[in-house]
Amino acid sequence: MINSTQSVSPPPSVAALPTRDLEQDELLDLVRAIAEDFALWREHVSFSDEQRHYVQLHRDAHVDLWLLCWTPSNDTGWHDHDISSGAIAVVEGSLEEQVLAVGAPSVRTVLPAGESYSFGPEHIHRLSGRDAGSVSVHAYSPPLWRLGQYAVTDTGLLRRMSVSYADELRPLTL
């Protein structure tokens, strides 16, 4: 299985984008449009329990778009998107998002096909495939460069490690 950070042909919906970083509502509109364009991403769908499959659909100076494929074994671990805002549209199956809470259990949300949402750079979460064969479209602006990967130590300390956008996110172990 090959995970690709090389963009495929730019989607038509990207041509209409402004030449600036996008706001969260614009990112949400974008992932919804890409999610509806099955011909754009269908050929890239592939699944593996050992390694989450992902393909960069587009990248320019202001936005990048990704297709991610999930099984229940795929888990990003806790992470942020550094300075980027993002949006996610679930197109097949369902995902589970956990949002980090301090002094309380994390907030869990099941995101079935057809659901979409956006978030700012302060959002710390983890995603996993709830159903086998789940697929989602993600957009980030400005484009991802670095991400913060988190782990909670046995003594309750939160540790952050900076990682490349091209690295597959997995739960950290300290």
Image (cartoon, helix red, strand yellow):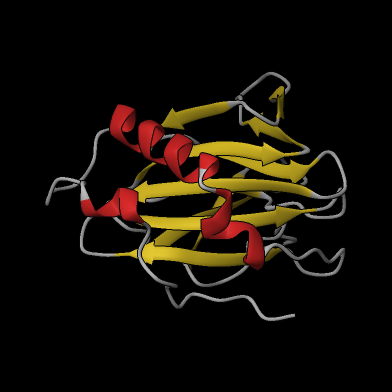
Which is more toward the observer, 69 or 85?
69
Q: Tell me which residue sits at (55%, 36%) in the image.
A: 89
Above or below 1: residue 63: above
In the figure, residue 51 lies in which quadrant?
Answer: bottom right
Which is more toward the observer, 161 or 33?
33
Which is more toward the observer, 105 or 43?
43
Above or below 3: residue 141: above
Q: Tell me which residue sits at (63%, 43%) in the image.
A: 157
- Label count reads 0
Q: Which residue lies furthest to the front in this view?
A: 39
**Quadrant location of the C terminus in the rendered image:** bottom right
Q: Tell me which residue sits at (70%, 59%) in the image.
A: 172
The spot of residue 147 in percent (x, y) is: 45, 58
The spot of residue 68 in percent (x, y) is: 63, 56
Above or below 168: residue 19: above
Query: Is residue 37 visible to the viewer in this orientation of the structure?
Result: yes
Query: Is residue 145 visible to the viewer in this orientation of the structure?
Result: no
The spot of residue 60 in percent (x, y) is: 26, 65
Which is more toward the observer, 69 or 156?
69
**Quadrant location of the N terminus in the rendered image:** bottom right
Q: Is residue 49 left or right of residue 55?
A: right
The spot of residue 129 in percent (x, y) is: 78, 45
Q: Tell me which residue sits at (51%, 47%) in the image.
A: 37
Q: Residue furthest left?
A: 19
